[in-house]
Image (cartoon, coloured by chain):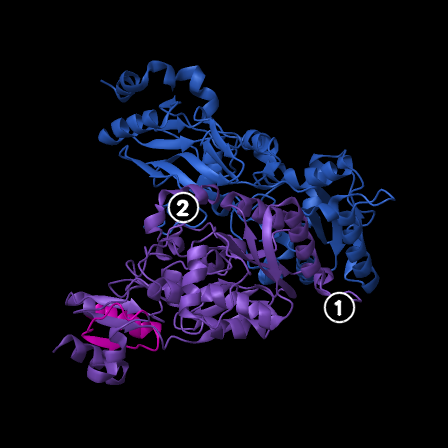
Chain colours: A blue, B purple
């Protein structure tokens, strides 16, 4: 019996895609990487994942796990391998409002979880441009950062529990919902970020947070990265760590973005080298209730801070979104980072962070002629 | 050559204590556990730790790492084993104010690090009663929670990088200072909380945070644990997660504490079943600057919240510290938890947390006659 016959016997032929049905799985979002998987397997339960891995392991057939396939590094290439897609493990098992946790399958799409949490006035804080396709399994396996990482940390910090199927099919139940769990070795963090090399994540317990009640969103130009760091700390301290996003966009990023999306206005009339996208969230009601003149305290506070820094010369220019449409426009520039990276020219594809106080030095290392930095994690 | 001769040859005889010099290391803070180590080794560098483990491993002599020996579980018992004390690895190598990190040896005492950070208007947020003796190595190896865990997370969440010497003497350098580091498997979290079983932590990079500018500290009596949870979330939301401590003390804890420390006044005139110690910190200047009448906004806000809950009956009684002496008195009751646990009668010694919304159920499981719960982690 072939490996596919064995798998069909174990979990049903309808879980297996081959030929033209499997073809779309041969390329990822970038289109830069293509492969022809032996077949695409779409199990619907953890037990089915276990059955597949047991069979594949016994006859040494490689298995590549995949979820939303929105990555930029070709990590789901499955040439001469079985691709195991977790897309059907897409149940939201539980939203625990009191405990502020969500228990979900690995195939749940990020934006689906966003909606489920918001229905209870909570949020799952991780967000990124691909949120409409990216799935929890891949986000955990790559320890995705996303654009709120500065406030909420990367995916690792948002995960309380995991269910993992190991290569031999054994199921490892680490589905703790505890914020502190000192029982045994911390295997959960070992699997997070392991890119599927240690097992396939099938379910997770995730942290939810209260939904911010209002936002202040701005584009700011500063003279240097060192001034940007001053601005970040100042805002964090003044808002009680309310800074949700602080994203550095060098001039080259702004330029490439405008080449790809000519309809988008430039952020400022002048061009600046150091552009920062900022979002501050108000979790306290007092910062989110409009004053008699209709302004939001969280927005006024940001205006005041930026105004003072404009006067002293640390901030060169600043625009604060006055409505949701302007806010979305500012966010779009950030969320197009994938397009800018892939279609904006040569780039260095890494997922490496630089210590905050070393970002300026790091940029100096790149010679002006080959400045390849398109977008950089600020935390 | 004996193992001690080999070690003396490698790193010097003055690193080795035996006989009466070693005797104090035979018991820990509790006095409940005693052992007679073969010798106590006090290396001064990572290279010396490595040399010791290489020798001990070659001749299969067990080594038990120890640091401040303030634990409550006898984990540093070293019967028929070498005790390796990290106490001389006590250098603070660096306080990086811009990056908000501290690089320290495993033998640095917690309160020493507190002082070093505060000199730069920063804090290392982990704190507990034993802070004057407990050392960074042990705090990391046990993933200590401490009384600020509700705000800052346990030690795991405060550690960015580690240096670890493995059992065969190899040194594992994981001394990253990055908030996000997706290079390779997350071995750092595997070693944290492993109680020394995977290697000996010799140094760490730790996160520092801005120093709160003012505190509001209170003892509060509520009718039930469910009301306590309501209070916690309400305060977290109203203060923008400014709740630094939220510690549940059942009536039995208050009683035992008063038996051990008869000079301490009872928190309220009446006795209540559910007593909560609360501390809220103001990181924003506007909450910490006294108003014309001399009151602190952070204190007034807590008074207002508790006052409203008193009126509606969710809070039964509340006392807010009006000065530092009253604040210390409230904290002392919490920090005596070790004494209460060990000298207050029979108890169950665990370091297990319970999901917030299950604490009441957990307590119900304990029959009234054998209620052994003395103090419980609330996050």
Question: Of residues A325 and A161, which is closer to you in this image?
Answer: A161
- Per the image, label 1 sits on a secondary structure element best described as loop
Q: Residue furthest left?
A: B1
Residue A180 placement, left or right of A269: left
Q: Which residue is mark 1?
A: B294
Q: Are marks 2 and 1 on the same chain?
A: yes
Q: Residues within 10 Å of mark 2 (few under 14, many from 20)?
A: some
* Chain containing mark 2: B
Q: Which residue is mark 2?
A: B363
Most foreground residue, B251 or B81: B251
Residue B340 appears left or right of B318: left
Placement of A49 over or under A348, stated as above or below: above
Residue B350 covered by magenta stretch: no
Residue bounds of the magenta highlight: B30-55
Give residue A209's mark.
none
Q: Residue B295 in the image: x percent, y percent?
A: 73, 65
Question: Chain under label 1?
Answer: B
Residue A249: where, in percent of width, then height?
67, 49
Residue B45 position by quadrant = bottom left
Mark 2 vs 1, N-terminal side? 1
């Amino acid at each position: 019996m072939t490996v596919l016959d064995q798998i069909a016997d174990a979990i049903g032929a309808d879980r297996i895609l081959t030929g033209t049905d499997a073809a779309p799985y041969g390329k990822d979002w970038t289109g830069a990487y293509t492969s022809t998987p032996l077949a695409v397997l779409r199990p619907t339960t953890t037990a089915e994942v276990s059955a597949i891995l047991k069979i594949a392991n016994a006859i040494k057939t490689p298995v590549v796990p995949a979820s939303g396939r929105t990555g930029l590094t070709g990590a789901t290439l499955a040439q001469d391998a079985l691709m195991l897609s977790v897309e059907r493990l897409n149940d939201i098992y539980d939203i625990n409002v009191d405990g502020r946790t969500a228990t979900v399958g690995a195939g749940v799409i990020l934006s689906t979880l966003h909606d489920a949490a918001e229905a209870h006035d909570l949020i799952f804080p991780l967000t990124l441009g691909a949120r409409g396709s990216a799935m929890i399994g891949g986000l955990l396996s790559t320890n995705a950062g996303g654009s709120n990482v500065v406030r909420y940390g990367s995916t690792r910090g948002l995960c309380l529990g995991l269910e993992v199927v190991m290569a031999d099919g054994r199921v490892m139940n680490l589905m703790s919902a505890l914020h502190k769990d000192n029982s045994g070795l911390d295997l959960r963090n070992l699997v997070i970020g392991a890119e599927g090399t240690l097992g396939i994540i099938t379910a997770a317990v995730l942290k939810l947070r209260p939904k911010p009640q209002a936002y202040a969103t701005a584009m700011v130009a500063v003279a240097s990265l060192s001034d940007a760091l001053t601005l970040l700390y100042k805002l964090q301290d003044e808002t009680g760590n309310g800074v949700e996003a602080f994203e550095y966009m060098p001039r080259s990023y702004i330029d490439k973005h405008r080449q790809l999306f000519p309809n988008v206005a430039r952020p400022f009339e002048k061009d600046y080298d150091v552009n920062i996208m900022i979002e501050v969230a108000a979790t306290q009601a007092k910062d989110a209730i409009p004053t008699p003149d209709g302004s939001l305290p969280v927005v006024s506070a940001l205006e005041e801070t930026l105004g003072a820094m404009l006067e002293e010369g640390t901030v060169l220019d600043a625009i604060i979104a006055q409505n949701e449409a302007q806010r979305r426009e500012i966010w779009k520039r950030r969320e197009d980072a994938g397009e800018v990276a892939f279609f904006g020219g040569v780039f260095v594809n890494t997922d490496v962070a630089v210590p905050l106080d070393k970002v300026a030095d790091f940029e100096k290392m790149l010679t002006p002629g080959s400045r390849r930095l398109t977008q950089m994690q600020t935390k």
